Image: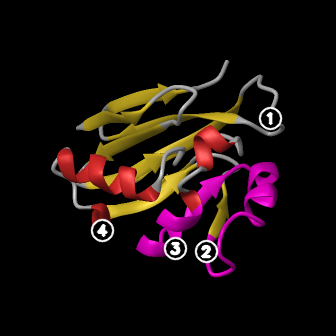
Amino acid sequence: MLTVHTLASGSEGNSLLVSGEGTHVLLDAGISARRIRTELCDAGIDPAGLRGILITHDHADHVAGLRVLAKQLKLPVYATAGTLERLAAMVEPTTRLLPLEEIQEVAGMQVQPFATQHDASDSCGFRITAGSRTIGFVTDL
């Protein structure tokens, strides 16, 4: 089973929860860490159950809560190499930054990044598969 729950979407901030096979990842963290935690709790998800954060690109409306959330929950951050390079200056030095280059497993889900056209360099979308279900996620096209 693969589910998506929108926490925020729009110029004020973007963040989605993707759940599959009992695990959860966040797609973008463009709202405050406090609001992300509140939205997760409202959806019946313990924030401590997150297994990582996937970032599409480094614009503020996609990463505003990243530094605090990754630090509080000790979450790894996954993104393309170019995006990770820019994120390194935004997060705590202890945050694990992991490059997404091809299909790889993240929290029991197969994640495949693909390039998107945007005014942020190295922006991407994601194809995520869990079990027999697949979703595609793109933003800011």
| Pointer 2 residue | 95
| Pointer 3 residue | 71
Q: Quadrant of residue 85?
A: bottom right
| Residue visible at 31% across and 35% down in the picture | 5
Tag 4's secondary structure?
Answer: helix
Q: Using the numbered discs, state the Cα–Cα distance from disc 2 to disc 1 in whole angstroms.
A: 22 Å
Q: Which callout, 4 or 3, points at the residue further toward the start of the chain? A: 4
Q: Give whichever of 86, 61 is nearer the camera.
A: 61
107 sits left or right of 13 in the view: left
Magenta stretch: includes residue 93: yes
Kindly indicate whether the residue at mark 2 contacts the one at mark 3 (C-beta within 8 angstroms): yes
- Give amino acid for label 2: Thr
| Pointer 1 residue | 120
- Give amino acid for label 4: Ala
The residue stretch that appears in magenta: 67-96
The spot of residue 83 in percent (x, y) is 76, 50
Kindly indicate whether the residue at mark 1 contacts the one at mark 2 (C-beta within 8 angstroms): no
Tag 2's secondary structure?
Answer: loop
Q: Which callout, 3 or 2, points at the residue further toward the start of the chain? A: 3
| Pointer 4 residue | 48
**Quadrant, the C terminus:** top right
Q: Using the numbered discs, state the Cα–Cα distance from disc 3 to disc 1 in whole angstroms.
A: 24 Å
Q: Using the numbered discs, state the Cα–Cα distance from disc 1 to disc 4 in whole angstroms.
A: 30 Å
Kindly indicate whether the residue at mark 3 contacts the one at mark 4 (C-beta within 8 angstroms): no
Magenta stretch: includes residue 78: yes
Q: Quadrant of residue 50?
A: bottom left
| Residue visible at 23% across and 38% down in the picture | 1
Q: Which callout, 2 or 1, points at the residue further toward the start of the chain? A: 2
- Give amino acid for label 3: Lys
